[in-house]
Image: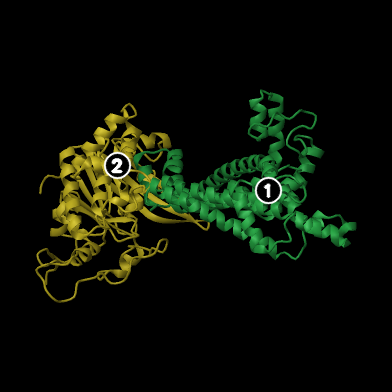
Amino acid sequence: MMQFSSPASHPPLLRVRDLRVGFRKHGQVLEAVRGIDLDIARGEVLGIVGESGSGKSIGMLAALGLAPPNAVVSGSVQYLGEELLTKPRREMRRIRGAKIAMIFQDPLSSLNPTMRVGDQIIEALRLHQPQMNARQATQRALELLELVSIPQPDRRLRQFPHEFSGGMRQRVMIAMAVANGPDLLIADEPTTALDVTVQSQIMRMLRELQAKLGLGLVLITHDLGVLAGHANRVAVVYSGQVVEQADVFDLFQNPRHPYTRGLIASIPKLTESGGRLYSIAGSPPALGRFPPGCAFHPRCERAGDICQQLAPPKTTIGGSGHVSACHFANALPEWDSAEARVKE
Amino acid sequence: MSHYIFRRLVAMPFLVLGIVTMAFFLTTVTKGDPLTALVSEQQLNNPEVVAAARQRWGLDKSLPERYVTYVSNLLHGDMGTSFVTKRPVLTDIAARLPATLELVIAAMLVGTTSGIVLGLLAAYYRDSAVDQIARVFALLGSSLPVFWIGLALLFLLSVHFQILPGPGRIDPRMTPPPPITGLMTVDTLLAGDIDGFRSAVSHLVLPSLVLGWAVAGTISRLVRANMLDVMAKEFILTARAKGAGELRVVFRHAFRNILVPVLTLISYSFAYLITGAVLTEAVFTWPGMGSYAVQAARSLDFPAIIGVTIVGGMMFLVTNLLTDIAYVIANPRVRLT
């Protein structure tokens, strides 16, 4: 599990600094993403975990210029040193789908129902490789369907999305995403809408392709359990901010934020029968209603007076890029990773 | 699909028979007596003249007899003789149908294209000035009566500013081209008469604008609503994430997906256009089916009324079939069996 690379040895593929996304509503701007810093290296799998509405998806969409028109985006997003947020729309289109590809949560609705599956893949190819003729593009589409293990690809190419199952559609989405040999793939809840058995197939396929093609992979999910097996590094997002970021091993061994601890404790364990599953008390704050100080304090067992007044600083833990935004990052009791709870 | 079309074509004659029957018996419900059209007012009190007229036009026969005679004549291509023009109804209709078709087709083109373009713009630039203007345009189009807009525009553009010609199909000083298709614009072109063509087109502008406006209004609203809906779908995000440009996103991905409701409305608008044509033709003294129908209805000219109804009904049957076929092309999930 030591395949992750430190930022020093490779320049980051994507470097996100102080990314903020707000939405204009009734004359005021409600922030959904409140200053996110992330680095993704080539060949690395970064997991971003958070509850729905935490801003994890919208942040990545905004980074690619895909935020809705009423969104206000600021900060910096650099792809191989090139700033993306200020890039003209035309140039962004050349990067999207070619260098940075994206797949979405619901494969049922993310393919165009009126276009043949083959045509949708071919469209992705020819948008970025206009010199390709129809025959070459079809041939390549066929290879791509084979790459994602879709049986009878020549027949499947001529079919429409409604003739595919959910898992098969997600494979098509993956085929389309890797069509132009991107460096970075952003997968937004890629398995959430799928059956459990299909989920693991899709995850395995994503990981295989990631390793084979040397992709940087951003896995956005609400399920920390998925990341345990697949991510190199994990960023935990709460209320539009990264509250803890660490190598996946460190994160599960030694979580240094009460929210992360809550998430880990909420993962169902096969070894335990009966008893109630742990859940974090309260619910995440609504957009624009973030509490002052540490946004997590109303739900936090450890919260003190300082948490209500002061936003927590980023505390570095150890030497492997483990950062926690908690006033008590170093003062939290020791963690029993085997039991997934605080040592008593 | 060819199976389906075949079945629909087989059903067609029965539907036509239904229309004929309905049209025939509906005329008998009216209280008026067609004799007023056939016999001059002074002679109406003369029983001999009235009886002779009744016999001559077959009005002395019983209703079922008249029906059977009518249907068997129809099978031989005879729609009877108009009480008013005293010419075969089929000849009258053949002379007037192309004028109406030309008007309706032009109005359809004006209405659908401007409706679609406005709807797309209104949806894409939601809540902007374009959206507001499109909204007012649609509201005016569907709320102002055709005869009012017709007269107002005729006065404004033809009489006052003299940008466009007045009523009629072609400049009255010109010799109309020999009728080949009956469509003035086509016939002038076939005759190589460029000035005539220009005149025919400019005469067509106002009536088709007036008639097409309401259609443009309803279509633009429908396109806007459906586009807003479809543009929020995830596959639009997929298309953008692929690097597709906005034009491609709007037309290839979004618009393609709203074709079914749009086609439905277009085919419904066809019904509106046929009825609207009656009033528009009256305002623009357009020698088409509409003015013929009005004339026939006023004078209880039964053969003409039934004839117009049958032809109108058949036009609906054909459009409905074409619409259903277009559905399949527009949406692969529609399967006609």
Chain A's shade in the image?
Answer: yellow
Q: Secondary structure at mark 1?
A: helix
**What chain does badge 2 belong to?**
A
Most foreground residue, B211 or A60: B211
Asked whether disc 1 touches disc 2, contact meaning CB atoms under 8 Å apart, the reply is no
**Residue that extends furthest to the bottom in the rendered view of this protein:** A275
Q: Any mark on residue B277, and which? A: 1
| Residue in the picture at 61% in, 41% down | B105
Q: Measuring from the top left, give residue B205's x and y in whole percent.
A: 69, 38
Q: Determine whether, in the image, residue B182 is placed left or right of residue A204.
A: right
Under circle 2, the secondary element is: loop
Question: Would residue B147 be visible to someone looking at this image?
Answer: yes
- Image location (x, y in percent) of residue B5: 43, 48
- The amino acid pointed to by label 2 is Arg
x, y percentage for residue A341? 15, 68
Judging depth in this view, the residue of A162 and A329 nearest the camera is A162
* Visual hue assigned to chain B: green
Residue B309 in the image: x percent, y percent? 64, 53
Using residue B155 as the reference point, say whether residue B126 is left or right of it.
left
Check disc 1: other Cα within 10 Å, few if <14, some if 14-19, many if 20+: many
Asked if residue B281 lies left or right of residue B40, the reply is left
Q: Quadrant of residue A260?
A: bottom left
| Residue visible at 28% across and 32% down in the picture | A137
Q: Is residue B126 visible?
A: no
Looking at the rendered structure, which numbered label has been put on residue B199?
none
Q: Which residue is mark 2?
A: A158
Quadrant including the C terminus of chain A: bottom left
Q: Is residue B266 left or right of residue A211?
A: right
Q: Residue furthest top?
A: B192
Q: Chain of mark 1?
A: B
